[in-house]
Image (cartoon, helix red, strand yellow):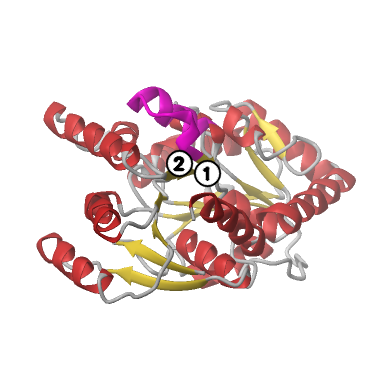
Amino acid sequence: MKVCYFGSYLKDYPRHRIIIDGLKQNGVDVVEVTSNAMILWRYPILFWKFFKVKNFDIIIVGEASNYVQPLALLCKFLSGKPLIFDTFVSLYDTNKDRNILQNPLISKLFYYLDKFNCRFSDIVLQDTYESSKYFIETFGLSESKFRRLVIGAEDKIFYPKKFTRMDGKFKVLFYGTYIPLHGIQYILQAAKLLEEYDDIEFQLIGNGQTFNEMQMLKEELKLSNLFFMDSVPYMDLPKYISDANICLGIFGGTVKSMRVIPTKVYQILAMGKPLVTGDSKGVRELLISGKNSLLCDMANPKSLAECILLLKNDEVLCEKISSGGFNLFKSELSPYYIGKLMLSFIKELI
């Protein structure tokens, strides 16, 4: 079986590497057709590359290729091959959630592009059932078109490593891109509630939309137990995860945060680290509080602080959710199992 993996995605983005690696582990031949050229050149380059691929069975359009999905649909029509669209995010919803381009005309354009891209695909992938539900209800799409394919993590990069803290600190780690759904302000407020515990230390890695605002909040709260660090190379992330006692997910409480499971959750599970993240319908599709994670109330610094303190004082619980999370990853979330599930979707169409 041969897959044409198509799009304008970044080749080193984990979502694509996990799917491609998983398909290859399940005996599928994958040929990538991708371009990040300027938008005016992207369509002709992709079109030319596509028609050089011979004897393939199906087109998979990689996540973050929303703008070239119309071309992929044309290629589907001309080749007569079925198409799976890994939409993963909605341009319309992302623009609203991050409050970027609040122009009614642009918003409407994004809306109809999302609707068109999904409407004419044979299968549309989402990472949670809640995200699929959003697409179905918002764009008036058929439920039968959607399949869930979790994000997972690269198990050749993220795996349990030996951990020994020598400084006596209980380190709480967050890393991310500082978008609103992360709810980083609630992490800072939780740090303030825990400032009486001299051995608890927060480390926040990353940069992005709300970073300057969070720096100002740190000064306002006069936090001495929380430290910012700029983004680190992707391959260095496991070192920082390994060095932490517990790792944090998202806490924003936005509409979108209630239906998504961020990539970092899977990476933390893969490394066998205790995970604390906000409770939501989306995350409950995967996680059970007290078994493979600890879930706190969204947008609630007191609830987050209580979870951190509980894990600090209960080594047995820490070990229980660490091993539970790692076992969940091994059994359902590794690239092999994601590739196996993707292969089952492919077989539905060919």
**Tag count:** 2
- Picture residue at 29% right of the left edge, 42% below the top: 117
Q: Which residues are magenta?
A: 130-146
> What amino acid is at disc 1?
Asp
Q: CA distance from mark 2 to mark 1?
A: 33 Å
First in sequence: mark 2 vs mark 1: 1
- Position of residue 301 relative to residue 69, above or below, is above
Query: Mark 2 falls on what kind of element?
Result: helix
- Picture residue at 31% right of the left edge, 54% below the top: 65
> What amino acid is at disc 2?
Lys
Which of the 4 image quadrants contains residue 137? top left
Judge from the rendering whether residue 349 lies leftward or rightward of residue 39; answer left or right. right
Tell me, yes or no, if residue 252 can be seen here. Answer: no
- Picture residue at 40% right of the left edge, 45% below the top: 122
In the image, is residue 138 part of the stretch drawn in magenta? yes
Residue 86 x/y as whole percent: 42, 50
Query: Mark 1 falls on what kind of element?
Result: loop
Which of the 4 image quadrants contains residue 113? top left
Q: Can you name the residue that lies furthest to the right here?
A: 316
Q: Which residue is mark 2?
A: 218
In the image, is residue 162 part of the stretch drawn in magenta? no
**Label at residue 127:** 1
Are discs 2 and 1 less than 8 Å apart at CB?
Answer: no
Residue 146 x/y as whole percent: 48, 38
